[in-house]
Image: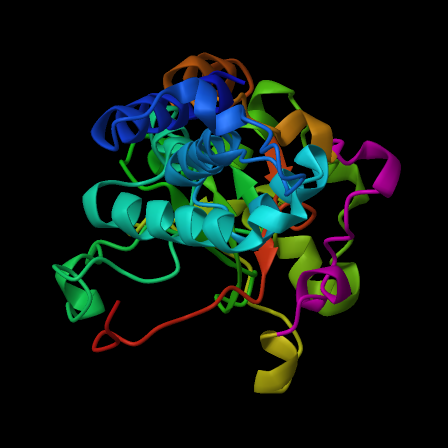
Amino acid sequence: MPGIIIGCAVGGLYAELQAWVLGGSIAESYAIPSDGSAPRMTAVTFVLTGAGAMLSSYTRLTFSLLVIMLETTSSINIFLPMTFAIFTARVVGNFFTNSLYDRAIRGKNMPFLRSEAPSTTRNLPAYIVMSKELVTLPTIANMDACKKALQTSHNAFPVLNTAGKLVGLIPKSMVVKVIEMKSFYDKESTDRSNLVSTEDRKLNNSDELMPSSHGDGSLLLTNHHEAPQGDSQMHGLDYDENNGFPRTPHEQVIDWRNFMTDVYSNEADAEHCLDVIEENFEEWIDLRPYMIEHPPTVTVHDCF
């Protein structure tokens, strides 16, 4: 509404200026000729086109705005001046700045992917901005690995299955939310007895089957008595489930609405959940229901 009012005011001002320059008066713009010809409504045309141009300048709408303006004003006869005003306003606006909505989205730090990369970074290869110190999480992660990951500045972590193969990507905010809601994995559901011989089971204790943290932040099972499997199976999403780690039941998975961020897209408070980690340091979390499966990958020489 403010844009329409300002546009109408600018259009009316232009009509007054035109009448003054041509030596007439604004009242003549509404005059009804005595010869019975169509009345002159030039001032109304300027007012309406001014409103359309103002809306286009800050919303950057074109065809939809043109249809809306013509239908709401029932002024099909001003199709050409309205079209010219709307498209001219859009071109001039793009030359100087972004649209009002684009600036509002950026001001609120809401994630918004542009259609193309900025010219200053368009040809930069990926290795310029990538982190060389990789931090990963396993599908079944213990609190030690989560703590190390959350203490980094990374926003997401590659997810490895218990064979050490990449199977997904998990955003930091989701890890924080799972820990905050204490949605821990049921250790009692694990069953790897069919993968270890009877003699080995007598020698191994339960700690040997616990996920363990490595120096790079990743987690692998310390028990390596699994039956040999093909490489394609080791990369599969059901590898862990087939090797004694069943998926978390659907009714125990956190509802997706709990992962929605506020309108300002505030960063997840990783520091807050560190206390929860210390209080439940022996627990595990299952990342399989929440991770991004088959994440897109790039090579180190791919450009933006």
At horizontal 18% and vertical 57% (from top left) the residue drawn is: 129
Image quarter in which the C terminus is found: bottom left
Residue 269 horizontal/vertical position (percent): 42, 19
Residue 156 horizontal/vertical position (percent): 41, 46
At horizontal 27% and vertical 60% (from top left) the residue drawn is: 117
**Which picture quadrant has residue 37?**
top right
Toward the viewer: 10 or 125?
Answer: 10
Magenta region includes residue 243 = yes
Toward the viewer: 105 or 149?
Answer: 105
**Which picture quadrant has residue 38?**
top right
> Along the horizontal axis of the image, is 271 left or right of 120?
right
How many callouts does the rendering have? 0
**Which picture quadrant has residue 98?**
top left
At horizontal 60% and vertical 35% (from top left) the residue drawn is: 39
**Visible in this render: residue 144?**
no
Question: What kind of colouring is applied to the model shown?
Answer: rainbow
**Visible in this render: residue 159?**
yes
Toward the viewer: 188 or 254?
Answer: 254
> Along the horizontal axis of the image, is 300 left or right of 8?
left
> Along the horizontal axis of the image, is 292 left or right of 57?
right
Given the current orientation, which residue lies at the most extreme front position?
35
Image: magenta residue range: 236-255
Vertically, is 33 above or below 140? above
> Along the horizontal axis of the image, is 147 left or right of 38?
left
Residue 258 horizontal/vertical position (percent): 67, 25
